[in-house]
Image: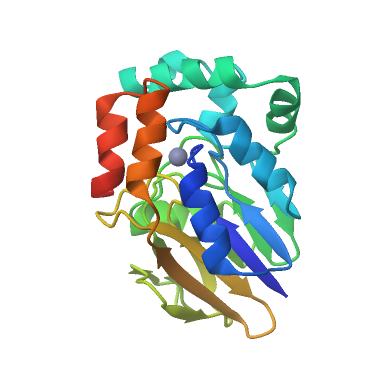
Amino acid sequence: MRFGLLGDIHANLVALDAVLADMGPVDQYWCLGDVVGYGPQPSECIERLCELDHVVVMGNHDAAAIGRISARSFNGDARRAIEWTARQLDRSDLSYIRGMPDKLQHEQVLLVHASPADPLWEYITSTAQAGDAFESTDAPYTFVGHTHVPLVFLLDAQGNILPGTPSDKMLLRLGNERLLINPGSVGQPRDGDPRAAYAIVDTGKSTVEFHRVEYDIREAQTRMQNVGASEWLTERLAYGR
Ligand code: ZN
């Protein structure tokens, strides 16, 4: 079976559609939260996902958009984007977001937006944080989003944690080692590469493939300008920061 990993779409439909086209058919999509927030098309992104066989966990921006956490926990631009997003969501969008669980575990796989111990907030950027995450779950393979930076942490048999930065078209073999994997962000990459990021888990081949795909950033920016998004949030798409 092939599973498409979609992290941090952030209401960027242009990027989402480019990723879906590039990915081709998969058996199911695994969505790592922050479907909405920042971007100009929250309802359209929810609608697109609902056309697909997918599972999804809740991100901090999703939680804020439905008022589960306060928009005041976010900085100015993010807060204004959350308030704008909340006004766009219709009844079915709200119930879709309310239905997102904090975590999903199935057989060997855990899906969570931020970290196993703190599903909405904790950023995993260091081996120490990855170590805490491995201790907080017994899942062999944990997939997270939240940082918008593709990362892999491998826990070897000696208990060492080896970090790695996946590049486009990199293939990682699923073996006996435990893994913590962030596929990067579809809708707002922050690793300096503005291309949309995604990954494919292939359980038949026991691999994870990492991918980057160009999308029409200018079109996404135009759509942001049309809804009055902040200049910084609009510009950063071009830099991938
Ligand atoms: Zn995010």
Query: Residue 110: percent from the left, percent from the top?
Result: 64, 57
In the displayed orientation, state which residue is furthest to the bottom. Answer: 205
Residue 204 can be seen, yes or no: yes
Which residue is pictured at 71% across the width and 55% down the height?
Answer: 105
Q: Where's the C terminus, which quadrant?
A: top left
Q: Nearer the viewer, residue 18 or 91?
A: 18
Q: In the rendered image of this protein, does residue 176 appear above or below residue 165?
A: below
Q: Nearer the viewer, residue 131 or 68?
A: 68
Query: Residue 60: percent from the left, percent from the top?
Result: 52, 32
Q: Quadrant of ligand 1?
A: top left
Q: How many marks?
A: 0
Structure colour scheme: rainbow
Q: In the rendered image of this protein, does residue 67 appear above or below residue 223?
A: above
Position of 66 with respect to 92 (left or right) is: left
Q: Where's the N terminus, which quadrant?
A: bottom right
Residue 142 can be seen, yes or no: no
Query: Residue 207: percent from the left, percent from the top?
Result: 57, 80
Which residue is pictured at 65% across the width and 56% down the height?
Answer: 30
Which residue is pictured at 30% across the width and 53% down the height?
Answer: 194
Query: Residue 128: percent from the left, percent from the top?
Result: 36, 55
Q: In the rendered image of this protein, does residue 96 appear above or below residue 115?
A: above
